[in-house]
Amino acid sequence: MKIAVSAAGTTIEDQMDERFGRCPYFLLVETVDGVIKDVIVTPNEGAIEGHGAGLKAVAQLGELGVEAVITGNLGPNAFNALAQMHISAYCGSGYATIKAAVEALQSGKLPEISQSQQAHHGMGVN
Amino acid sequence: MQIAVTGGKGGTGKSTIATALALALAKKSRVLLMDADADCPNDHLLLGMERQQIKIVEQRIPVWNMQTCTKCGACGPVCKANAIVSVTGHEPFFSSPQCHGCGACAHNCPTGAISWGAKEIGTIYSGKSGAVDLLSGELKVNEPASERIIQEMKQLVNQKKTAYDHVIIDTAAGTHCDVIAALEGVEHVLAVTEPTPLGAHDLELILELTAAMRLPSSIIINRYEEGRDDLIAPVAERHKIEIKARVPYSEEIVRSYARGESISHPVIDSLARGLDASFGS
């Protein structure tokens, strides 16, 4: 399974970023039978966009063949676009590291994000 | 004649001067005032008029024909507004509020699957106050393309231009697309500024724009204080632009403005006479 996690840093020991469209990195975590096999870090192309950051990020993850996203909040556009791309979204808030959140997903403990939150507006940092 | 009232900086008195000038010209001419600040139109308030809706402005948006769309993913990456997510093998996702209607998606579609629909982006109103007729455009909140409203208003102005001696176009602040659309084709630009470092800085920017557009321009200093030419005069000299009028700071004008009323002043009357003599039909 190919999972993308909105990340504050570049390793799976770093924290998840609560923001989806404006997180600095995505960690692409490949799991096989629930075990982490591979981790790739990629900058979030949406982070520096003036507007439409969430949609830019969905397009990026879609082209990478991501099947699930772990993040904190999803704006309405990103929420709907992920659904259309058949990418599931899970809430990883409350876990100390990205690794812990991925493991929680693998053991079925992460709740699916079922509705969008308010969008994060503005460039880069907020 | 068509004269634009602009200035770069916000709050310099563009609408105050534009409405006062329209009223002064209307004493002997047929005047149409076009409020081209479609984000925050105020001229109808200064003129104390009720506006009537005359037109809904629409903007084109792409519509996908899923019979011919091959889900190739070509439309999304060319959308600079990030309004489209297209991932190979999936139906494209479209977010209408972001779309400017540029057409890059349709242009780039290899199977011609994208045609045009429309979304409502704003309204054009008309109003009347004594001898001044008003056209006022208002953009819907969250829509990006205010220049579309201005372009539609200009079409209406062109249809009616024989009915008026003078058309005054009151632009938004800034030097962006909506201001450019408002300035296009005018015979003269009045750049309203104030004697502050901020006014001088933004005056430079608008004069660079009018020079690039090759539009004859002059400067109006609002809230002018006697003897204080040190900030604006050097800008005027550098750009070889005439300072056409100096509207003095006056408590009476400030009070009128605070009440949301139009102003009158001998300097504006004199400016109107000068413009009428230079550009009158």
Image (cartoon, coloured by chain):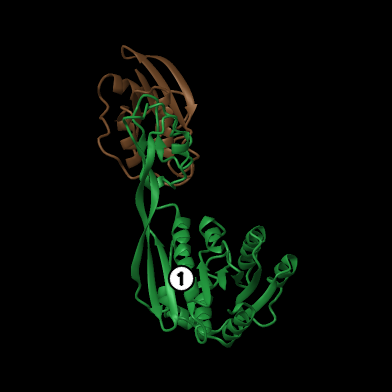
Where, quadrant-wise, is the C terminus of chain B in this rendering? bottom right
Q: Amino acid at mark 1?
A: Lys
Residue A17 picture location, percent across and down: 41, 34
Image side of residue A109 versus residue B16, left or right: left
Q: Taking B146 as reference, is B224 above or below it?
A: below
Q: Secondary structure at mark 1?
A: loop
Spot the green chain and give its letter: B
Where, quadrant-wise, is the N terminus of chain B in this rendering? bottom right
* Residue A16 visible here: no
Q: Which residue appears at 47% of the width and 59% of the height? A: B151
Please tell me in which quadrant of the rendered image residue B40 appears.
Answer: bottom left
Spot the brown chain and give its letter: A
Q: Quick one: A102 or B33, which is closer to the camera?
A: B33
Q: Which residue appears at 42% of the width and 80% of the height? A: B259
Q: Taking B34 as reference, is A72 above or below it?
A: above
Label 1: chain letter: B
Q: Quick one: B252 or A70, which is closer to the camera?
A: B252
Residue B145 picture location, percent across and down: 45, 53
* Residue B244 visible here: yes
Image side of residue B104 versus residue B124, left or right: right
Q: Taking B109 as reference, is B61 above or below it?
A: below
Determine which residue is flagged by label 1. B160
Number of numbered callouts drawn:
1
Q: Which residue appears at 66% of the width and 67% of the height? A: B216
Residue B193 picture location, percent across and down: 60, 71
Q: How dense is the environment of label 1, judged by Cα within 10 Å: few (below 14), some, or many (20 and up)?
A: few
Residue B209 picture location, percent across and down: 63, 59
